[in-house]
Image: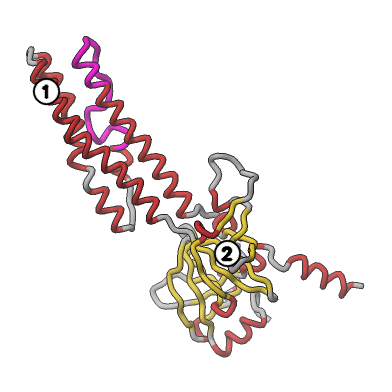
Amino acid sequence: MPLGQDDLMTRALQEGLEVLTLKVGQQRVAVPMVEVVHILDAIQARTLKVEKAGADADPSEGDAVIAYEGAALAYLPLWPRLGEKSNTHELTCLAETLAARKQDHLDWMGALSHSLNHDVPFTKARNPHECAFGKWYDSFKTDNRRLRLLLLQFDTPHQRIHALADRLLEMKAQGRLDAALAIFAEEERNTLATLLALFDRTVETLAQIRREIAVIVRHQGTLYALGADGVQDIRFYPADTLSYNVALLQRYRVPTRCFLIEAGAEPLPVLDWQRLTGVGADARAGAQAGAQA
């Protein structure tokens, strides 16, 4: 029997296999549709246990259960098992970063006001590409169209705010402090307010696009919930697209039933999620002990 093959795979070699394709961090993986019962919103259905791994822990890695049809199912997040971080974790961290960058610009304007009103130097970044937000903004990439369009709106007000330092401090040096303070007040009411509102809208958008699903699966009559970032596809693969290439299976280093091969795409691993999560391990151990007796 080829490596990774079981009864389901034996049938699949003759009949083909329908799979549910999941996004788990940066990976694309599949589970057989015959084992899938339901898909639901894990964030709403998950109830984290009281014990916490720490304030900075990824909530998808916590010990939890999923509420499904009045029952509490074991929640088995796939991210730590595949060496990935969840979309929820990444977006939560991003929201925290943007909240800090919003405060940076409040502090920046406060420092400029202090320099204008008192004889103290202004030491914060004048170049919009050199502040912490500017460095992040120039390098950040996203495939979420809604988020990308929102971030594009930051460029003009962010550059306008940073341009104030040279402009207003030069006016002060020319003895035009009152005019400089009037411009500062106007920009604070308008440009800064626009920038701060963009930070708030982006954080709200991150909360709205945050995704975490629970795939309810069945094994030997018992239901479990697999945690993933989202569903990509449901597709039937003919038998001749299934691969049990030993080198490929060993290189993937995660319990895998087979790979699905299609032209122009990376091989799609069909997870042996039971082995990956330890489901059924006790039953197998008991069966082995009975056989040895």
Q: Given the image, on which type of amino acid does mark 2 rest?
A: Leu
Residue matched to label 2? 226
Q: Secondary structure at mark 1?
A: helix
- C-alpha gap between disc 2 and disc 1: 58 Å
Indicate whether residue 283 is drawn in magenta: no
Q: Earlier in the sequence, mark 2 or mark 1?
A: 1
Dot label at residue 253: none
Determine the main secondary structure of the stretch shown in magenta. loop
Q: Picture coordinates of residue 27 (x, y %)?
A: 48, 62
Q: Is residue 6 above or below residue 123?
A: below
Q: Given the image, on which type of amino acid does mark 1 rest?
A: Ala
Specify start and end residues of the magenta stretch as a single range: 111-133
Dot label at residue 182: 1
Residue occupying the point 51% across, 81% down: 18
Q: Nearer the viewer, residue 25 or 111?
A: 111
Q: Secondary structure at mark 2?
A: strand
**Quadrant location of residue 32?**
bottom right
Residue occupying the point 29% across, 56% down: 146
Q: Is residue 112 above or below residue 86?
A: above
Say which quadrant the C terminus sits in: bottom right
Give the number of the mark in front: 2 or 1.
1
Is residue 249 visible from the viewing direction of this image? no
Side of 123 relative to 68 (left or right): left
Disc 2 crowd, CA 10 A, few/some/many (<14, 14-19, 20+): many
Residue occupying the point 65% across, 68% down: 274
Q: Picture coordinates of residue 94 (x, y %)?
A: 40, 45
Say which quadrant the N terminus sits in: bottom right
Q: Exactly how many numbered labels are in the figure?
A: 2
Q: Is residue 197 above or below residue 8?
A: above
Q: Nearer the viewer, residue 209 or 237?
A: 209
